[in-house]
Image (tube, rainbow, N blue to C red):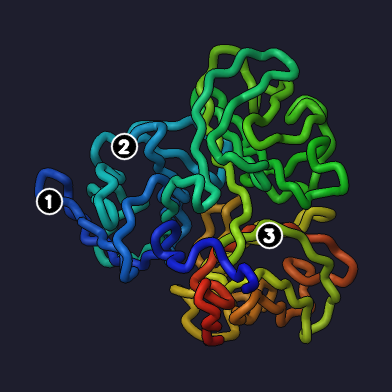
Amino acid sequence: MAAYTTIDDSEAYFQTKLYTGNGTAIGSGGLAVTLDGDTDMQPDLIWVKERENSVNHQLYDSVRGVTNRMYPDGPYDEDDSDGEGITAFNSDGFTIGQDSNTNESGEPYVAWCWKESATAGFDLVGYTGNGTDDTDISHNLSAVPHVILVKRRDGGDGGAWNMYHHKNTSAPETDYLVLDTTAATADAADRWSDEAPTSSIFTLGTSSDVNDSSDAFISYLWTAKQGFSKFGSYIGNGNADGTFVYTGFRPAFVMTKQTDGTDWWVINDTKRNTYNATDLGIYPNATNAETSDEAWTKDILSNGFKHRTTNSGSNGSGNTYIYMAFAEAPFVNSNGVPCNAR
């Protein structure tokens, strides 16, 4: 029998949650957010964005400590939310204090949540930089990483979010993208030391963004799992009957970036748009509110996604894009049962 998926239950490892803030401090109970999936999931990485106002994104993870937040939309140091941001990773969700970026009364939020697991191809690695070229950092994926996202936590002067993506160019170990800017792909040996990652290590150069001496860093690593996640690239066709991207699952989350130009990063998901066309974009590189924009319009299908725009933001003729996608359901589960289109 054909191997359709390695993960039948996507909700065990990734879920998107929409919630409304109540503005309540932890001393008064805060806000307990329960994930919607049929399967309970204690997250290890939570990415929160208020949808209606221009405020910072916030990232919390189980390696840095639950109250420590980072901001993917800019080169900022980590800080402690002092009990106002996320204060607990619960068995099926999380608890928040009264921080306005995550829990302002009456405001709508989206939270994308991942569970760390080699089974699901996700690992969190903290390390201390040494400023030395060709430095190897161990990871626990037991597979070659397809995406590596690195951020310096301290240092007093921020530091960019550097990304390795295995489909960025024909020699991705020589290049990098920056999550908190719109910059096109750049070539620099001081990021990954021009060495491809392996099933046990990834390699750093001397850039202060990835390996500043004595500074603390966090890295998020993903490798594709059939029927659950995929990290690829595509060429736009500049047509409203746009490029189709096969993933092997019905996506719950898609993030794209033009690599040969300066269009914005964008995230679409199936909780904020429950039917096609999916056009509500959130921009990782900016504090902007959620926007309904033709530039990001796509259909979410049972086996991938298809662009419905001529805009260069996601489907410019001849332009190259990378993507990260996580599943709502596999195209065909391990029993041979196909999923429905929405």
Q: CA distance from mark 1 to mark 3?
A: 38 Å
Q: Give the CA distance from mark 2 to mark 3.
A: 29 Å
Q: Residue furthest left?
A: 28
Determine whether 189 is above or below 130 in the image: below
Residue drawn 20% across the image and 56% down it:
31
Amino acid type at image mark 1 = Gly
Q: Quadrant of the N terminus?
A: bottom right
Where is residue 126 shown, x and y percent of the image? 49, 28
134 with respect to 218 (left or right): right
Measuring 62% from the left and 45% from the top, which residue is drawn there? 180
Residue at numbered disc 2:
67
Q: Are marks 1 and 2 in contact (CB under 8 Å)?
A: no
Query: 274 or 37, which lies in front?
Result: 37
* Residue where numbered disc 1 is placed: 29
* Position in image of residue 229 (x %, y %): 59, 60
Q: Position of residue 334 (x, y in %)?
A: 52, 72
> Would you name the residue on which mark 3 appears?
323
